[in-house]
Amino acid sequence: MNSTPLAKSLRSRHIAMISIGGIIGAGFFIGASTPISIAGPASLLSYGMAGLLTFLINCMLRDIALHAPDRGSFVNHIRHTLGAPIGFMTGWIYWLVWVTTLGMESMALASLLAPVVHIPYGLIEFLILGFMTGANLLAVHVYGECEYWFSMLKIIAILVFIMIGVTILVQGHVPVWNNIASQGLLPHGTMAILAAVPSVIFSMAGTEVVTIAAGESDDPARNVASTARTVAFRIVAFYLTSIALILCLVPWNSLVAGQSPFLYTLRAMHVPFAGTAMEIVIVCAMLSTVNSGLYATSRVMFELAAVRDAPGCFMRLHPVTQAPWITVMFSASAALLIAITAIFSPDVVFAFLLNATGAFVIFLYFLIALCRIRACGFNLLSLLTILLLLCALVAMAQVEHTRHELETSVGMMVFVVVIAMARRAYGNFSLPGHDGNAPHRDLSSAPPDAR
């Protein structure tokens, strides 16, 4: 029986950059125009609220990791603390969120690259997923190195943007006040600040990946705690500074939702080669998302298999790289299937997947906060986290599109929890693949009903 554990070859520098990559994704470079169009200049407050929430969630993850450093990812912590059905739901819907995101990112990348490389759209999607799958099939430090350099490029791009923006402002040729307040500081009312918060939260989502990656590092608890200490600085330095500069440099109402405000601002300031440079950064940011998505889904599925919430074959590791190669292939295949579904059934199946996963980030953060309260006790940070999450849910309920996402997400979560409870009611039967030949994993920290 193979008892090979996952490799422990990620270093502190990898974990630090994985954390940054989780916060600064493609959604920031492209999607920042959406909250600005919703709330106008007051969107800076929306980013502040979402940034505070992200910081608090990192504090919750830190406390959970320090409480039981040998328990694995946040999914295992939730399962142990809140019960097996909630753990089952969290793991499988988290996987579904990521594979849906992988399908979306591969489609977006294909749409960017197709006019340049003159290769059929579908083939580009296949090549993108194939390339990043190959990287994840190698030793885990290859994933860490890829994410390190992807994140480094994103940091350099933001720093260069900030330097250019500050230089232009110092020259004094930009009508800053007119750009910001030509229609008032609250052009769409106070509630617009809350309405923009969910889209900002989604752009910052991914910070929890560091708790998964830390399990393959030499000191998981210390690495998670280290990233939690610096996340506030990163949010202020990258998010708030960049958004403030965009609001100062161009009229906020000239931005179009779904288009990169960074690219628009650089072109408006007549910065040479801005288009090409920003497109390279956006492509790398998308590749980073695909890279992290394949990693996160494969490791979470590996943990689900360890507690018999997924087929036992998902625990098999490659004898050389020690990577869970079956789960990597499974997640990549599911992402490709979702991308194909978006072509043949965009308004039914794909739309349902988008709606079903739309609000799960908010509920995931609720579960992390509840897990922290249950494991470590109640404190003021926990209360503030719950209040901010309630504000985000209220904001989603106020807007028709996000309200539909909220309803569908709740329905999907209830459905998965019912499946988990039915499994327990009819005996903790094994899923296909638990044939006794899967590698053994120590479940001493798992709840009794999961062993």
Image: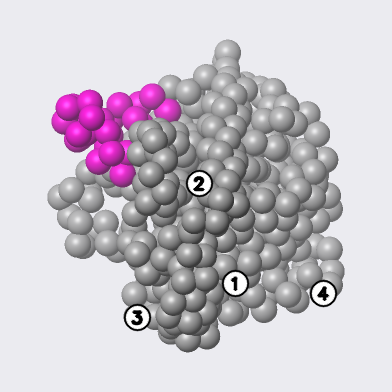
Name the amino acid type tagged 1.
Leu
Counting residues from the start of the chain, the first of labels 4 and 2 encountered is 2
Residue count near mark 4 (Cα–Cα under 10 Å), binned few <14, some 14–19, many ≥20: few
Counting residues from the start of the chain, the first of labels 3 and 2 encountered is 2
What is the C-alpha distance between the residues marked 3 and 1? Answer: 22 Å
What is the C-alpha distance between the residues marked 3 and 2? Answer: 26 Å
The percent coordinates of residue 400 (x first, y second) are 34, 80
Name the amino acid type tagged 4.
Leu
Q: Which residue is mark 1?
A: 45
In the image: residue 152, left or right of residue 277:
right
The percent coordinates of residue 89 (x first, y second) are 52, 60
Q: In this figure, what is the number of numbered marks?
A: 4
Kind of element beneath mark 2:
loop
Name the amino acid type tagged 2.
Gly
Of 49 and 348, nearer the camera is: 49
Kind of element beneath mark 1:
helix
Q: Which residue is mark 4?
A: 380
Specify the label residue 400 is tagged with.
3
The percent coordinates of residue 334 (x first, y second) are 34, 41
Name the amino acid type tagged 3.
Glu
Point out the stretch of residues depicted in magenta.
Answer: 108-133
Q: Does the segment drawn in magenta span residue 202? A: no
Q: Does the segment drawn in magenta span residue 128? A: yes
Q: Which residue is mark 2?
A: 25
Q: Looking at the image, is mark 2 or mark 1 nearer the viewer?
A: 1
In the image: residue 73, left or right of residue 261:
right
In the image: residue 131, left or right of residue 196:
left
What is the C-alpha distance between the residues marked 2 and 1? Answer: 20 Å
Kind of element beneath mark 3:
helix
Residue pushed farthest top?
320
Counting residues from the start of the chain, the first of labels 3 and 4 encountered is 4
